[in-house]
Image: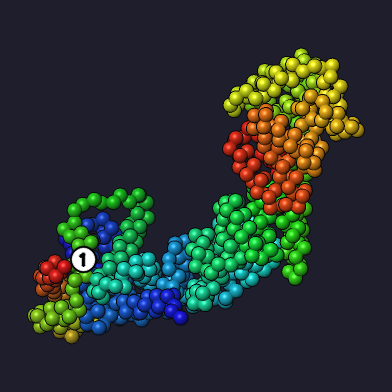
Amino acid sequence: MSNLFNRDRRRFEAFIRQHRPSLLGLARRLCARSSLEPEDLVQETFERAMPEFAHLKDRTDSAAAAWLCTTMTNRFLDYCRRQRTESRGMPHLALVQDLAVSPEETQENWALVSTDAFQKAIERLKPHLRDAYRLHAEGKRYNAIAEHFNVPVGTVGSWLTLARRDLKELLLPQVAVAREQGATSS
Amino acid sequence: MTTPCTNLHLFVDGELSAPDAEVFRQHLGRCPECEAGLRELLQLELLASRALGGSASVAEPPPAKVTPLRPWMQRMSRTVVPVALAAGLAAVGVFRLQTQPEAPTDVWLAGADVRTLEARLSHPMADRFRPYEPMRGTSGAANPLPLRPLAELEEQQDFRGIAAAYALRGDWQQAESFLSRAPASADRDNDRAVVALSGQRWEEALNLLGGALRQEPRHAQALWNRGLALRGLGLLKQAEASFRDVASLPGQAAGWQVAAEKRADEMRALRDAEAARWQRQVRETWAQLTEKTADAAYLVREQPAVTRAALYEAVRTATSANAVASLLPLASALDGLGEGTVLQDYVRDAASRDFKVRAPLAEDYARLVKGALVPGLLERLRVSQETDLYVGALLHTGEATRDAESLKALQRYAHGSRDPWLNLLAERERARSEEASGRAANAEHLLLATLRTCGAYNTLFPCAEIN
């Protein structure tokens, strides 16, 4: 007997298992030293994914991850704004300003970047930036990375900033190419 | 001097001190550049985490403390989400869920010592007898649904069970959507009727229950709920009968039997009280009208229905043309509330009668209004030309519900008068005669139709009198 319920549940479980660790990693960093629970942030994110799952399940891993990232970022920003409003005891007035890149555009851009593309990009970084970023991605703190390279902690910060700038520059043209391919193939 | 914006990377990497992190979070809420930067940065970090396998910051162990998920559960129960997915989230999402009590009986609030739902659900687990106590405040959210047993129920395709769990928590939307997935049965119709009752959609509930009872005439929950629907419609006599039916069913919990008996008695008492109150009001107003002590303007404004009924009696019991004619201003004021001139026409017609003939009949009719039937009065009225008195006597004695010819006379007169209220009363008598002949379903049908018509006149008529 076909059981729609079970199939949906298993797919959603698999979806959560796949994305939860990396989301939780980000959430722990965002929530560090605050009263916000990283698990709550992630849980809320998946909760929001539930009604959207019919669409999400058929998208690429990158697109789904980008969606989850945007959603979690939104939840986190909401939290920040709420905190701000509460601490200052005044109503929050939304700031209407033109952003350089809209949230939707950010999400769309990153939805097109595959993990393969990322691995190729990181190989093209300068060796010290690449290695520092790898250590960081493994979960090493700044002081551990600084010790590894025997450099001041501040240097690690600027290396990571540079690594990210370069990665973005390497990956964004790929986005443009992927878009063009998408446009020609459709 | 560093602006907070320069701290974005340090913040995302968790390298800021607690106060600096706090300052940055506050800054984030009002800095569009940092917000855009944060979005970009987090996308990149997430991608790195996925591409490089590590989870980018598994540096800390998961927190040992167990945080309650209450707020989350409550939110869930308010929004319509696919239960399958919710169950998936519950299963994978977190160990924390396991700290929620998940004994299956919790699904149907088996631990509660009272029930807050007046209607009865068909699911046996949800239909255990407990004394009824109307819900105060919003305690529904205090009983979050344990999701895992719910998922198991869905796996077993026990949609009525899931719907019952939602219904017990007042989540009618979810209850309804699960019932629509349950296979057709008397039980399902009963439960859908419970949903309708929750929205005071009495007629819809009654239709569903009718369907359920055609399949299973002795369906205890359906009979009980039918009592509730009929009460909602003001059909207290029928409601009483339905509760009596429940009480007479064998093989059920004694609590339900006693509760049904009690409800039936309540319906009877309520009906008697309402009828007595109505009769008293009409009699008092009638007395004021005949003794000319009535404040007509006040009566018309404050109690038009009672005044209308009293006007008929005042006209019928008046023993002179002048006495009848003096009621004309009141009749026209009452006519003015609706449309037409039926009451003025009636008063004029009555004033033109021959009072040598009419006065003695009117005097005996007045005795009937006070509760004493002079023997032979009905027959004298029947053969007289004073049809309005005859009709009044038929209504007082209920003769039209027993005798087909009398009923026809009543209907003829009502129709000829074009008086909507008299026509409604004639329909009521017809329904009662159907009931007296053992055709209760027809009677109910007629009464419902009559009530609908009556309701359309707004507050002009005492629709409770249709009951």
Residue furthest bottom as drawn: A148
Which image quarter is the N terminus of chain B in?
bottom left
- How many numbered dots are placed on residues in this image? 1
Q: Quadrant of residue B219?
A: bottom right
The answer to whether residue B442 shows anywhere in this view is yes
Q: Quadrant of residue B40?
A: bottom left
Counting from the top left corner in percent of width and height, residue B188 is at 57, 65
Residue that label 1 marks:
A108
In the foreground, A40 or B180: B180
**Mark 1 neighbour density, 10 Å: few (under 14) some (14–19) many (20 or more):** some
Rendered view: B282 above or below A177: above
Label 1: which secondary element:
helix
Q: Residue at x 67, y 68 (%)?
A: B128
Rendered view: B379 above or below B247: above
Q: Residue at x 61, y 39 (%)?
A: B453
Q: In this view, does A91 lie to the left or right of B308?
A: left
In the foreground, B68 or B285: B285
Q: Residue at x 37, y 55 (%)?
A: A86
Counting from the top left corner in percent of width and height, residue A62 is at 23, 74
Rendered view: B13 above or below A86: below
Rendered view: B157 above or below B406: below
In the foreground, B184 or A83: B184
In the foreground, B441 or B188: B441
Counting from the top left corner in percent of width and height, residue B377 is at 87, 30
* Amino acid bearing label 1: Glu
